[in-house]
Structure formats: C-alpha cells, structure tokens
Amino acid sequence: MWKTLHQLAAPPRLYQICGRLVPWLAAAGIIALATGWVRGFGFAPADYQQGEGYRIMYLHVPAAIWSMGIYAAMAVAAFTGLVWQMKMASLAVAAMAPVGAVYTFIALVTGAAWGKPMWGTWWVWDARLTSELVLLFLYAGVIALWHAFDDRRMAGRAAGILVLVGVVNLPVIHYSVEWWNTLHQGSTRMQQSIDPAMRSPLRWAIAGYLLLFMTLALMRMRNLILLMEKRRPWVSELIQKRGHR
C-alpha cells in the first residue's frame, strides 16, 4: 500500500493524475452548482419567517461547511507531511489554503449579509462568527508562512505546524452554538424540518462547492509541482512537448 502511495505521490505521476481529474471535476462542479443555485434561487419556496432573504443560505452554508472541511483536509495532509516527510503532502497544504481562505471569506461576508435583517447588525462578536474569523486568520497565516521561506521543506514544515495547532479551532466553530448562548442559528443539518424543496438544492450546492474546491486545489497543485520541479528533466520535456503543439 505504501509503495503504491509513494508511486502515486511521485511529482510527474501526481501532475499527470491531477491533469486528468481537473476537467471531470470542473464539469461536475459546474453542473452541481448550476442545479443547486437554479433550483434554490429560482424555484424553492419562500421561507415562512425569513421570506426570500433565506436564499443566501445557498451561498453561505456550503462555504461555511467547506471552510472547516478544507482545513481538516489540510490538517491530515500536514500531519502526513510532518510524520512521513512526504513533500507532496506539504505541497497539498499550500494548494488547499487559498481556496479555504476564499471560502471562509465568502462565509463571513454572506453571513453578515444574512445576519443584518435577522439581528439588525452586520457583525457581533458572537462565538461562531469570531471563531470563523480566527479561521480566516489561520488560513492567511499558513499562506504567509509558505511564502516566507525560500526553502520549500522549511516552508512546508512551518505551515504544517501552524495548521495542526489551529485544528483546535474547528470544534469551537462547530459546537459554539451548542456550548454558548449565541445569536447564530443552529447548524443546518439536512434535518426533516427543512422543506425538501429547499433542502435538495442546498445539497447540490454543497456538493458543487466541494467539487469546485477539488478542481481549484488540483489546478494549483499542478502549478506548485511545476515550480518545485522546474529544474527536473521531465518538466523540460513537458515544456518542449507543449511548445511543439
């Protein structure tokens, strides 16, 4: 198993695999997002309490879910890179971080827009909101550490350590609405209390955000592999092949 994993993680092989997956993931992501957003914004019924304003849920909830999910994936990659010294795992952390930061920013902005009519203010230092803001700072810190060192091994190690330290923030975000008396509503859990006409588009949007993340992360992974391996013969051969097309 480990031999196969190391073979798949070889830069030339991983670059090739990412290239094959990107078009399929991108197409599936576009279909999922289009399905979710068209049905959610165009055909789902209005909410009996929030009216039409609840529809921002189709932007906010998937971004909030995957802002945490991406960080968890980064933590797994960081642990793998630190313990087993796998360069591609550390590279995966760097590939995922910008997408996670954007998702977290989207979650904060759409959450503020959703909260304004509900709470009467754009922002409160609520446990959920504050811990989500901390998550954005963690993403920014990981990105900054990755670019702070010329030595990629040192950069990957520093970024990985910060990722693992920041993992403690994830349960705080997830359980904050249960541990403390907060203004933020409870988690949206596909529960039966949500009208199926609203729940189904949300599931499509959540799947679409995941596929979009995978597409963007793999595209960035390919670029990072080329930068790291730019002096390798296989990269020179790849450039020559593209130049002859």
Image (cartoon, grey):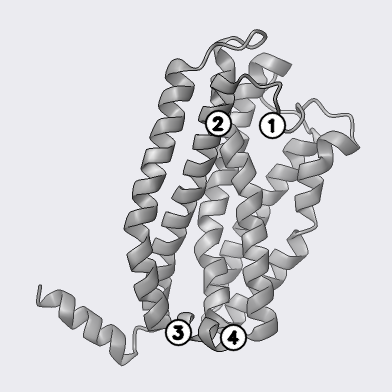
Residue type at mark 3? Ala
Dots 1, 2 in contact, CB < 8 A:
yes
- Seen at 56% across and 59% down, the residue is 97
Q: Can you identify the residue that label 3 sits on?
A: 10
Residue 201 in percent (x, y) is at 51, 29
Q: Nearer the viewer, mark 1 or mark 4?
A: 4
Q: CA distance from mark 3 to mark 1?
A: 40 Å
Residue type at mark 4? Trp
Can you tell which quarter of the image residue 133 is in? Answer: top right
- Seen at 68% across and 80% down, the residue is 82
Query: Dot 3: what SS?
Result: loop
* Horizontal side of residue 18 vs 133, given as left or right: left
The answer to whether residue 215 is above or below residue 181 is: below
- Seen at 44% across and 28% down, the residue is 37
Q: CA distance from mark 2 to mark 4?
A: 38 Å
Q: Nearer the viewer, residue 240 or 15?
A: 15
Q: Can you identify the residue that label 1 sits on?
A: 188
Q: CA distance from mark 1 to mark 4?
A: 38 Å
Query: Dot 1: what SS?
Result: loop
User: Residue 176, labelled with which disc?
Assistant: none
